[in-house]
Amino acid sequence: MAAEISPREEEAPPEETRTVVVQHHPLVRISHWLNVPILLMMILSGLSIYWASPVLKHAPDPATGNTDYLADAGTWAAAHLPGQRRFPRPQNWFYDHFSLGHGILAEALRLHWFFAYLFMANGLLYLAGLFLGRGWRALVPRPRDAGGALAMVRYYAGVVPAKVLRRPWPHPPVEEKYNALQKLGYLSMPVAGALAVATGWAIHKPAQLGWLERLFGGYDRARLWHFLLLVLFAGFVIPHVVLVAADGWDTFRSMVVGWSARRRGEGSDERP
Amino acid sequence: MSDPEAPVPGPEEAGAPAAEAPAGSAAEEAAAPPETAEPAPPPPPGPPRRDGTRLVVLPASRLRRQSRRDFFLFGAGAAAAAAVFYGLLPDDTRANLLTEGQREFLDSLEGRIGFSAKRRENVLNRALTFDDDVAEAIYSPGRLVRTFRKSDRTPVPNNYAGETPDPDYVPDWTLEVEGLASGKKETFTIGDLLSRFRRHEQVTRLCCVEGWSAIGWWGGLRFADFLEAHPPAPDAKWAKLESSVNLDSDGDPDPYFVSIDLPTARHPQTLLATHQDGRPLSVEHGAPLRLLAPMKLGLKNIKAITKIVYSEAEPPDYWNLQGYSKYDGI
């Protein structure tokens, strides 16, 4: 080998090299980005379906007969947000802004089924990438992650005030690919995805898959779980995007190219 | 997207796609004398670390090339995804989001890459058909749907799509049946049906396509018994159940019709229901005869049936014509 390489070295100076940390298998990256349109369409069409028969309901409003908390939220938004006063039907404000729209159940159902199959296929792609690229190792929780996650919550809670007060506010040490809070967050997503699929099937085929429906506590409970998983997805995505933006280019790039230039926890590598 | 792991030799990489550099070159470059800009020699690429990541040493030019390619693929993928996403959006959604000028602009762009409303319909209908095929595949004719206790009953809403018909039709009501093996058209009164068939009772749930459900106590003859007593033509695979008394929301006649595959009709829990809560059906719930097929969505459970036609070809279905599934098996 050395004999082969030496003539080349004489011809040209050795090329500049970089050491990078390979983080994400190509299938993980592909499925990660495919999730953006797929999950978006699942949420938008899902809320259009929700419109037809809301899960979270109250006693009928004496004036309008409305029972839907989300319609209430829309009415409030239309009345209080700037520039929304002239919105034609305030009851539909929420659905016209956060779903495909109101009154399009048939279209929403077709899109929901179509993207549900894409979502399931994409989930399999992700799992394949997670195992082929050994990415699952970064997601396995350990008992000490509980403390680590709390330290991260404390850090995030104080980081802005500390900046304002110009106090030192050190980031808790991160020895691995993810900090403990990231780990729990990223682990929760495949779990939530699987639960969204399972609750979805439970309410899609409650007669044929009655056992699945009962597993989630009945038809209406399964609908509630299915909806709460949407809340969980939204509750993940918003801070996820904000934190990636705050963390910077390297983190974003790593999900496109697969590697990071940041060599985190170098010391821990030496451990057996 | 390319895999920057490829040049690292290792047992796991044996099946990896061939990289541009011959295997082993990265290791040699790692072992090259430390004349690079880095002050310390890079650690040798070791086995995967405990967190699943691994260090690799790559020529900077190659890393740049791969990154350029990955970002190009990322951009191309994002553009393609955006085009498909927009192409699948319902017209109402586009009208909500965009002005007419923006819509025309985007629609003309979509047209240039071959998207159209017709293609959108085709794609979504194919997805619906696929989902129906899955439903049919998991359907087992012997599997009974869950039954409940009478105390589990919930109010069953009157979900007539339009206005509830005037009860005037009830006294003169008859059921016409066509497509029979006898080749004749037969007519039944409710008295015929009640006297000639055994009444079965069941407490089952109706699930509406909208998402709500209701548990009712129903009684009636089994569709299977009716099929046995008055068999359809041998080649028949479908039943079209019609109601001529349905009205639209303005109160104008709006005949309702559903397609039911004969295996569903023969299911032991599929009733031609005549009773609810032990009493004859009310007009709100389809007096005097309605379909009760609890393994289908509520919209297949047609009220006030006036005609049954057996056929070999799949008949049309009221809600399928409006974009819903035609199978509707739950």
Image: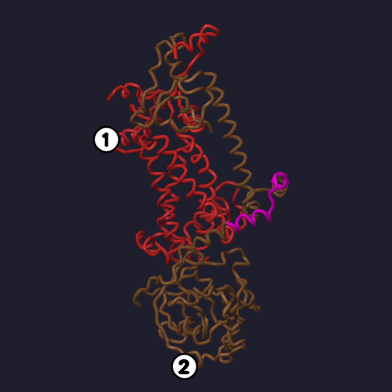
Chain colours: A red, B brown
At 30% from the left edge and 22% from the top edge, which residue is drawn?
A: A270
Q: Residues within 10 Å of mark 2 (few under 14, many from 20)?
A: few
Q: Position of residue B247 (x, y in %)?
A: 62, 78
At 49% from the left edge and 35% from the top edge, which residue is drawn?
A: A26
Callout 2 amino acid? Ser
Which mark identifies residue B264? none
Residue mark closest to the camera, 2 vs 1: 2
Residue B306 vs residue B203: left or right?
A: right
Q: Is residue B30 magenta?
A: no
Q: Check the image and report above or below for B116 versus A106.
A: above
Q: Secondary structure at mark 2?
A: helix
For the residues beneath circles 2 and 1, the answer to whether they share a chain is no
Q: Which residue is mark 2?
A: B195
Q: Main secondary structure of the magenta part?
A: helix
Q: Which residue is mark 1?
A: A144
Q: Which quadrant would the C terminus of chain A be assigned to in this image? A: top left
Chain letter of mark 2 equals B
Residue B53 vs residue B231: left or right?
A: left
Highlighted magenta segment, given as a residue range? B106-126
Residue A138 vs residue A3: left or right?
A: left
At 38% from the left edge and 27% from the top edge, which residue is drawn?
A: A162
Residue B183, picture quadrant:
bottom right
At 57% from the left edge and 67% from the top edge, which residue is drawn?
A: B326
